[in-house]
Amino acid sequence: MKTTGNTILVTGGTSGIGRALAERWHATGNRVIVVGRRAELIAELTAAHPGMSGYALDMADAAAVADFGVRVVHDHPDLNVVVHNAGIMEAENLAGDDWLAVAERTVSTNLLAPIRLTAALLPHLRRVSDAAIVTVSSGLAFVPLTKTPTYCATKAAIHSWSLSLRRELGRSGIEVIELAPPAVQTDLMPGHKANPNILPLPVFIDEALSQFAQMPTPAEILVERVMFQRAAEREGRFQSAFDTINSRG
Ligand SMILES: NC(=O)c1ccc[n+]([C@@H]2O[C@H](COP(=O)([O-])OP(=O)(O)OC[C@H]3O[C@@H](n4cnc5c(N)ncnc54)[C@H](OP(=O)(O)O)[C@@H]3O)[C@@H](O)[C@H]2O)c1
């Protein structure tokens, strides 16, 4: 992926990792388009960063995503990178009666939305130069946290989907890059942002962007902290990593 001169669409660009990436890419010579449900944050971001564009959109709404695909290509014919970052992580209490609703909205947001948006944009991405699709999985794709089973399953699915897409779309010159963050201080889950034991957002963004800047871009962007989970299976310590992660709190 080029580091400058791209037109990059970042879903979930209103906060956390997506917002930080959007701001950094904007500041380093890329045109950036952000998507999120919170229109007021989009207005704030686009006002603060002249040239940045934004769309208020619920990525879990299949029809809205299909319409948006048409609209964004019309508005930004030079769009060449899509970053499927929007995501939710909610605890699923298997002893309660609301976990199915949580599970279904998690699948819609974290898995179906990237698939739907890719379907909407793929004909366009096949036509442009320097096209790239960035998926956002998680360390939890590789060693799950049992309190969020469906979240972890969507991230494992995103990893698998990325592998297949990379092979299939590489033939058309479309790069597929998987960003697999470890726990990072954002509002993804209550308490995450203030947790001193997890990675501060700016530290994560610096390390991730230094890997994005490598040529060729690594197929997987893996900061050092995530290797505890990413490498657990191949290093023969999956069970101990699984036990460690699930013994906390
Ligand atoms: N932070 C971590 O520890 C961590 C670790 C591994 C992976 N990740 C992944 O990183 C990505 C970003 O998460 P984050 O940590 O930056 O959390 P965050 O601050 O909560 O950001 C999530 C973003 O997704 C957007 N979003 C959620 N549901 C949406 C929907 N239905 N439609 C449109 N946008 C939606 C939110 O925007 P609106 O609320 O405005 O819609 C927000 O901009 C997620 O995919 C997450 O799974 C995070």
Image (cartoon, rainbow, N blue to C red):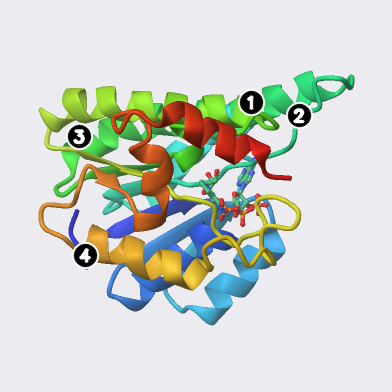
Instruction: Give me the C-alpha separation between circle 4 and circle 3.
Output: 20 Å
- Residue visible at 18% across and 52% down? 217
Mark 4 or 3 closer to N-term?
4
Q: Nearer the viewer, mark 1 or mark 3?
A: 1
- Residue 63 placement, left or right of 96: left
Q: Secondary structure at mark 2?
A: loop
- Residue type for callout 2: Glu
Quarter of the picture containing the C terminus is top right
Q: Quadrant of residue 106?
A: top right
Viewer-closest of 89 and 191: 191
Tell me the number on the disc at residue 196.
none
Label whose residue precedes the other's in the sequence (3 or 2):
2
Q: Is residue 154 left or right of residue 190?
A: left
Disc nearer the start of the sequence (1/2): 2
Q: Is mark 1 within 8 Å of ligand 1?
A: no
In this figure, which residue is indicated by the disc labeled 3? 126
